[in-house]
Amino acid sequence: MDQPNTVNSVRLLYFSGTGGTKRIADVFEKELKSRGLDVLIKNLGESLQEQKDTPADQGNRVMDLNILLYPVYAFDAPRPVYEWIESVTGQEAGEKIAVLSVSGGGEMWPNTGCRSDCCKALEDRGFRIVYDRMLCMPTNVLIEYSDHLAMRLINVIPERVSRIVDQLLAGKVHRTRFGKGFVSRRVSELERENAYQFAQRFEIADECTGCGWCELNCPTRNIELPETASKPRFKDRCVICMRCIYGCPAGAIRVRGKFVLKNGYDLDAVEQRMKDVKLEPVEKCCKGLLYKGVKNYLLDKD
């Protein structure tokens, strides 16, 4: 049931690994400010570089609404999101929150339970969840989307964000009741158990220049480049976000297997390649069961 609503201030919280979720967060910030709202940004995976380049936030003020954005990792929210939830103060507890997950598969099994544990954890901390929904961006592991499909997902962001903001400001309540099944829950558990050490399997190629980009940009500060070493070292806080692999200027961080996309993950490069190119129809971009959730999302059937 929809509720009377007055929103003048919004806290926008997000975690982003390779940049897809940050793009959506940036559009939310622009849209919310265009409505005359007071917006507080909180990056849940702030790197040393981002700490340098962005002003400090305004503390834990009580806000009329929180919007939480995160990419789906192993059918769940990434660990930094749960770390933030565990750190929530009494000042924030009781506030309204919208939970928005971002995936490359859409609202399809096994992604369907990707917000259930996060929402429960928020409710346990006293938040009132008023809205939850899935948004889509190109996946950054295993399956490489065509440039046409990637551009369709990028292009639809402003319309989807505007619609969600309309609904939130109107007091629209939207809750999904998907729970986790055995398979997705077990995958999530395995990811939590093994992600910590994942980066220690990385191979640093001779192309590494010791520039320190990875150390500055790791969202969990899992990488260090000691003064006495010429190559980075990895600690035990990896969340498998892939930022260091795709962002390394020398392409020197590598992992065995087909987990990593052969051509990398660079949405800016996709936009450059597709400038002035007429996009293929959604039905052609999204052939097969694997793309059903994304197809429904783009055709507005989700």
Image: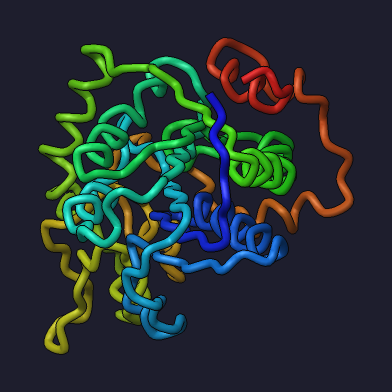
Q: At 74% from the left edge and 43% from the top edge, which residue is drawn?
A: 159
Residue 52 vertical placement versus 192 (above, below): below
Whether residue 93 is visible: yes
How did the renderer colour the structure? rainbow
Q: Residue furthest front?
A: 4
Q: Is residue 214 left or right of residue 274?
A: left
Q: Is residue 239 left or right of residue 171?
A: left
Q: At 45% from the left edge and 55% from the top edge, which residue is drawn?
A: 18
- Among the 4 quarters of the image, the one containing residue 280: top right
- Among the 4 quarters of the image, the one containing residue 285: top right
Whether residue 209 is visible: no
Residue 247 image position (x, y, % from top left): 44, 63
Residue 294 vertical placement versus 47 (above, below): above
Which sits in the foreground, 10 or 170? Answer: 170
- Among the 4 quarters of the image, the one containing residue 110: top left
Q: At 70% from the left edge and 27% from the top edge, which residue is drawn?
A: 298
Residue 134 image position (x, y, % from top left): 51, 32
Residue 5 image position (x, y, % from top left): 57, 45
Query: Total of numbered circles in the picture?
Result: 0
Residue 162 image position (x, y, % from top left): 70, 46
Q: At 45% from the left edge and 21% from the top edge, which residue is drawn?
A: 176
Residue 175 vertical placement versus 196 (above, below): above
Quadrant of image for the C terminus:
top right
Which sits in the foreground, 181 or 61? Answer: 61
